[in-house]
Image (cartoon, rainbow, N blue to C red):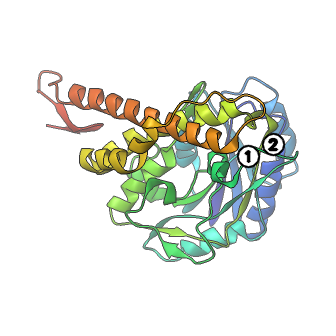
Amino acid sequence: MRAVSVAICTHNRGAIVARAVEAALSEARTADGDVLVVDNASTDDTAAVLAGLTGDAGGRLRVVRETRLGLSSARNRALAEIGSPVVAFLDDDAVPRPGWLAALVAAHADQRVVCAGGPIRLHFPTPPPSWLIAELHSTLTAYDLGSTPRRLHDCPGWDYPYGANVAFRTDTARAAGGFSPRFGHRGRRQLQHEETDLCMRLDRAGGEIRYVPEAVVDHWVLAERLTPGFFLARHAQRGRSGAICEVLNRGWRPALKRLRWWDGPHLFVAPYRPRDPIDPQRLLAECRRREAVGYVLGLAHALVLARAARRPHGPGGVRESRIGVATP
């Protein structure tokens, strides 16, 4: 059994997935690891590309196909397939820097640690637009908590490791139920927070989550994402899934408190429809306004789920006392 497995979930990324797989294999060879690629219902040439890589991997690369579309489904398939004690998730458009995997494995040497993640730096194959200011980089999955290792405990959702660079103790992640299908990208539904939700559950159960500054990946930013429309849609989706994640994991009072102190003030910003030349500060304000609106819609959705959970089900009167938790 290998010490660690790298899991890469991919959907219709035949043109770029090889770069991530080859870099992951290089890391796996130095850390007694292997690589599992989950082809999530791809309809392009992804399968052929991956088949071409398998023959040169020296037995360290395995590919499985998951027909249920959705990032959470793909990641749960990886958890089910992997036998290594640690699984490190890497996005199909991310490239790890040397030492990435060894740093994540070293963090898990402490048996109290159930999750670890590190910085995500943005890599632009083509020059980014002038309106892309630093405050918008997190929309593209940039993540950096500095150069000091530390435990992440009961922190804001955006401080937990991001899915492009996060590792879990495999059996612990399975026992916690894996990734919730309420979250994660699925076709046109681009909800986020699937890894944040799992981190919150593990944190609440007493497991330690670590920030590992030595475990760095470069996230390649595709040109198709460098449009104002992408940023506006991503913020709206982030607000919606963020609200549901807060209610599920922390309850209504903290969720409403966040609305009052963080998202609420952005609701009253004057709308902005980006047109050339794009004003970066007004675009940032509009992104935050869209996220706040999305957060309100997410709270409304969570309320509907909560009311449905209180209704009795079946002859035994089984109901859900909290969203998604069945109790007699």
Which quarter of the figure has residue 271? top right
Q: Residue visible at 34% across and 34% down? A: 299
Mark 1 neighbour density, 10 Å: few (under 14) some (14–19) many (20 or more): some
Q: Is residue 155 left or right of residue 25?
A: left
In the image, residue 85 lies at what x, y percent? 54, 63
Residue 265 image point, x, y percent: 41, 44
Mark linked to residue 132: 1
Q: Nearer the viewer, residue 84 or 184?
A: 184
| Quadrant where the C terminus is found in the figure | top left
Among all residues in the image, which is located at the extreme left?
316
Rounded to the nearest whole Å, what is the CA distance between mark 2 and mark 1?
6 Å
Q: Which residue is mark 2?
A: 129
User: For numbered disc 2, what is the local secondary structure?
Assistant: loop
* Picture layout, residue 25 above or below residue 37: below
On screen, residue 175 versus residue 321, left or right, reads right
Disc 2 marks a residue whose amino acid type is Pro
Residue type, numbered disc 1 = Leu
Residue at 73% x, 36% y: name it.
Answer: 278
Point out residue 287 in the picture as x, y percentages from the top left corner. 57, 38
- Lateral position of residue 145 relative to residue 158, left or right: right
Q: Position of residue 323 (x, y in %)?
A: 28, 37
Disc 2 vs disc 1: Cβ atoms closer than 8 Å?
Answer: yes
